[in-house]
Amino acid sequence: MNKIAVVAASMLLAGAASVGAAGAADLSSPMPVKAAPAPEAPLWDVAFGVKLGTDYVFRGISQTDGNPTVQGYAELRLFDWVYAGIFASNVDFPPINQFGGYTGLTDASAEIDLYGGLRHTWGAFTADVGFVYYYYPGEIGVNTLGAGLPAVNIDYWEIYFKPTYVINDVFTVGGNLYYTNSYAGSGSTGTYLSGTAKVDFTKWSPIKDVGFYVSGELGYQWLGQTDLGNIFVANYELPSYTTWNVGVAFTYKAATLDLRYYGSTLSSGPSYVSGVGYAPFGTCGVVSGLQNVCGDRYVASLSFDTSFLALK
């Protein structure tokens, strides 16, 4: 009803006004403004970065035996959908532990991850699905140090799905789902599921270009029966475990300083492990071959991340 009344009043006013006044009124009304088109995604870009850290912790287990790490990566991105990259890090998997005993590890000289997949963003939601191959060059050969020492080489692959959702400019949540048919070359299936959360306080930063956020992850690693394929070593059950991390990070342009705590339910003391029996280094030793690479770990890292297009 109100809309009809407005139209009728407009017609009466138009009839009473002169043609020139009507023309002036038309010229004074605002012209419609077209919305600015959204910027097109670049056809290609190459992201790259380096990191220096006091430790390299992967799913609650140190990959450098508690020693510092130097890492780097490069990633090609195409059409805002396809990506492929390489990641490299030093590792420390000693074949002999601090007590002079054999660990069954392969003394690899590095970890090189080759990965690729599809990643795209729809509004606040990003989906990432892909494949990663963990390659450890420089491993000693199977049975080099004796029967079953080491029992296998540890190269393996995983497929993954990693969704994230940006709730607003402060809160972001996500998840990680990984699967392999041979965890660390052991023949055991492995499934890793985790949830992540990030709270970004950058909007309240009093210093230009300096941001800071708090983030964390809670995950569970399912493992199963090994299938080593080595006549000198009996197969056994790898223990599944929970792992978590929480930390605070400070950013300045392309640099990030991260201070993080890692933990897990893996034990390091002598214990009876289901499917294994007596384990002198607990469940940590069964999964990793070492005693002191699990438990509470505090890591500081400094990283630099950018891309070719960001440098323009």
Image: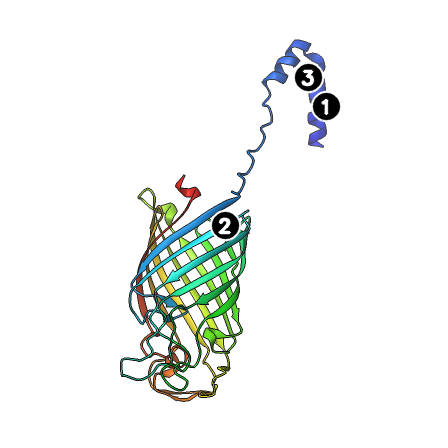
**Amino acid on which the number 1 mark rests in the picture:** Ala
Quadrant location, the C terminus: top left
In the image, 196 versus 41, the foreground residue is: 41
Q: Nearer the viewer, mark 3 or mark 2?
A: 2
In the rendering, which numbered label is found on residue 276?
none
Marks 3 and 2, how far apart at CA = 61 Å
User: Residue 106: which quarter of the image?
Assistant: bottom left
Marks 2 and 1, how far apart at CA = 59 Å
| Residue holding disc 2 | 77
**Amino acid on which the number 2 mark rests in the picture:** Arg
* Coloration of the structure image: rainbow
| Residue holding disc 1 | 8
SS for dot 1: helix
Residue placed farthest to the left in the image? 99
**Amino acid on which the number 3 mark rests in the picture:** Leu
User: Residue 105: which quarter of the image?
Assistant: bottom left
Using the image, determine if residue 4 lies above or below residue 270. above
> Badge 1: how crowded within 10 Å, few (<14), some, or many (20+)?
few
Give the residue drawn at x 48%, y 74%.
183
Using the image, determine if residue 98 lies above or below residue 311. below
Count of numbered marks: 3
3 or 2: tag closer to the N-terminus? 3
Residue 53, image x, y percentages = 31, 61
Residue 92, image x, y percentages = 33, 71
Residue 180, image x, y percentages = 52, 71
Q: Nearer the viewer, mark 2 or mark 1?
A: 2
Q: Is residue 33 left or right of residue 243?
A: right
| Residue holding disc 3 | 13
Marks 3 and 1, how far apart at CA = 9 Å
